[in-house]
Amino acid sequence: MNHPMIIVGAGPIGLAAAANAADRGLDFVVLESGPHAAAAVAEWSHVRLFSAWRELVDPVARRLLEAEGWAAPPADDYPTGGEWRSAYLEPLAKLLGARPSGEVRYDARVIGIGRSGRDLLVDSGRESDPFVVHVATAHGRERLLGSGVVDASGTWRLPNPLGADGYPAIGEHENRNRISYGTPDFADPDVAARYVGKHVALAGKGASAQGAMIGLTRLARRDPGTRVSWLLRRPNVGDAFGGGDNDQLAERGRLGQAAKAAASTGVVSELTQFRTEAVQVQSDGRLTLVSSDGQRVADVDEVIVVTGFRPDLSFLSEVRLDLDAALGSPRVLADQIHPDHHSCGDVRPHGHRELAQPEPGLYLVGMKSYGRAPSFLAMTGFEQVRSVVAALDGDLEAADRVDLVLPETGVCNGAGAFDETSAVAGSGCCGTTSAHAEPELISLGQRPQ
């Protein structure tokens, strides 16, 4: 009996995998934990991407959509997450779900992947028996059989904690109503009201943190009581502000310059080597953050944590994996993507051979394939799934033909800052006099299943 290819996640890379499967006439089922396509992207719909439209549409998906009359947005425009979703991802999901050989299911959360009738210890028959995927739905638990599994579930659901040990700091969970993860939408009046005039502790160094910093310094123009304690785990700011004018992702270069200007406004106080150990409640209800070396930041009203994300491996406990011990990415890929040594632009082209796991027919793709590394770009994922789907179809000639040229950059650290055209606080290139923030810029580091 033939079984469909099972794709976990209806985000940009999962849908691209489905498009490649459809193009090859393969049966497929896409399982999305959210209520609609690209549910994770919807959660950062206010964010503008670093990549232009030309880099955000899978080539095979484009061909399938254009055959149905779809018109691509202007190639040089930079969409927000919401625009990416409404103009491309939703139409693609609708098209794929309507195909006789395909199905896109929502509110279908994968809770386990294994081999039918065989647990992790059993060797015999693993290569010939189908995969079994356990799914939690509104109607109960289901068990699906698949010929192969493409896990494009991303990392969005597992943000790294404030605690520097890799676990939540003491008191972090208890005070979660004062702690947010990711870059807030400061253009939302309710969100802005939460932070304006407050003392905000901002944890993180990358582009997401810089975007939050820019937004908070803008709020300080409305209320000078707004102040930011920027918590950095490393000894100095270093290359946090990126490649500047040398960044081939031009919008990311602009972000770094804008963040550098924001950091010098007097609103932001930098605290280096601050590795949060505890979150304590003061007698007045505000918070004190305590570092492992004894540093303290007192009178904190709100905390924004943008320290990266990690893959969810919990539903892969019954399949055989070969992952890097530090990153959690496929081991063969880890040396190419480690953030201490590489940026997005110097990642070598790679496909099914680098992404394959010891469990034949199982592939981790997209942001999940990068584990805890933040330097993923959408076009990397498009090439990954083209190769992987070709391999699952038995077309090794096409699968091995991997070619991709990526833009070089000074730093790749995830979600980014605001899209503006005038100076920030009289300096830089990305400020505005508008009372409301424009959408932020982000390099694709998504968080789904």
Image (cartoon, helix red, strand yellow):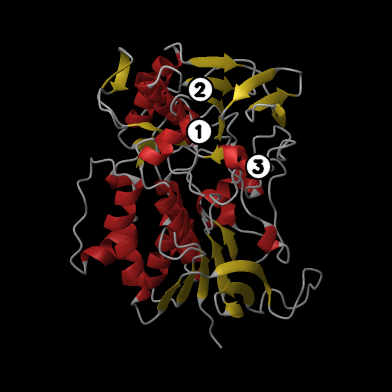
Marks 1,3: beta carbons within 8 A: no
Q: Which mark is residue 327?
A: 3
Residue 279 image position (x, y, % from top left)? 70, 31
Q: Identity of the amino acid at label 1?
A: Asn
Q: Quadrant of residue 401?
A: bottom left
Q: Residues within 10 Å of mark 3 (few under 14, many from 20)?
A: many
Q: Quadrant of residue 79?
A: top left
Residue 301 image position (x, y, % from top left)? 56, 28
Q: Which residue is mark 1?
A: 413
Marks 2,1: beta carbons within 8 A: yes
Q: Nearer the viewer, mark 1 or mark 3?
A: 1
Secondary element at tag 1: loop
Figure quadrant of the N terminus: bottom right
Please give the name of the residue rendered at 63% of the width and 17% of the height, measured from the top-left corner. 272
User: Is tag 1's residue or tag 3's residue first in the polypeptide sequence?
Assistant: 3
Q: Which residue is mark 2?
A: 240
Secondary element at tag 2: loop
Q: Residues within 10 Å of mark 2 (few under 14, many from 20)?
A: many
User: Is tag 3's residue or tag 2's residue first in the polypeptide sequence?
Assistant: 2
